[in-house]
Amino acid sequence: MDAVIWFIATLVLLVVVVQWLHRHILGFFFLITGNEDMALVLYFLPLTPGVLLHELSHAITAFILRVRAGGFTVFPRRDSSGRITLGSVMVEQVDPIRSSLIGVAPLVFGCSAVLLIGYRVFGLSEMGSVLLAGDFQAIAATAGRLFQTPDAWLWLYLTFAISNTMLPSASDRETWPSVILFIVGVVALVLLANQTAIVEALALPLGAAINWLTAAFVITLAIDLPVAVLLGLLEWGTGSIAGRRVQYSKPGDDKPKRRR
């Protein structure tokens, strides 16, 4: 139960932080340029590796599931409603199961990349052990050694770009409700039938998946939170010097407005 609570807590916090970062990265560039199109391009550029992986994950998963896909694009654009799209892949309409798997692919690929960088490049398994031990001196020493990793800033940047574009978009989630309802129904039937053997067989892989996702979310938050603080300070400082600020509209409308 503790693992599930940690998973839900880190997921909710991740969604909030990622949405805030996207809005304020775009807002900061709009503040310093005063041009919507230029701000959109500057907003897209640092996220390009993650956008590329996001769209490739859709295309690769569609290929594996034998679903036709095309129209691969990686470039920012804004539709008539003001919503921003950084990339897209056209996928044929198929059954909800395959559509959901294609939709969730960026999260799976993105978490895999984040964990691969974290454990293979930065050796975060050591960080995990000192965190569990609660030795703050060892934590500080281990964190300091992370920046001694060859090309540390490049890997940190790639982690940031990938982790902040791995969440499925609204279109990716369109078929999720029906699939989730089906899964809940199956689980309810299994529990009502008192099939403990099935429950025990599913508990281990489900627990491993939850721990895997939580670890990826924690790594992402460890990078995103300091970036959010720095971005907030930069935006405030730039606005104070320039004598203007960005007014953010309601959620769902990605278009910032510059106010004096």
Image (cartoon, grey):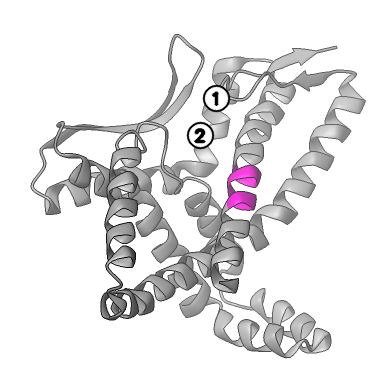
Q: Main secondary structure of the magenta part?
A: helix
Residue 79 seen: yes
Seen from the viewer's position, the closer of residues 80 and 3 is 3
Residue 217: percent from the left, percent from the top? Answer: 55, 61
- Left/right placement of residue 177 relative to residue 71 reads right
Q: Please, is residue 90 above or below residue 213 in the view?
A: above
Is 122 included in the stretch rendered in magenta? no
The residue labelled by disc 2 is 44
Q: Which residue position holds label 1?
A: 40
> Which residue is painted at 37% across and 38% down in the image?
173
Asked whether, in this view, residue 73 is left or right of residue 35, the answer is left
Q: Nearer the viewer, residue 140 or 158?
A: 140
| Range shown magenta | 12-18
Q: Quadrant of residue 135?
A: bottom right
Q: What amino acid is at disc 2?
A: Phe
**Horizontal and vertical percent for residue 17?**
65, 46
Q: Callout 1, which amino acid? A: Leu
In this view, 111 is above or below 166: below
User: Marks 2 and 1: CB-CB under 8 Å?
Assistant: yes
Whether residue 74 is visible here, answered yes or no, is no
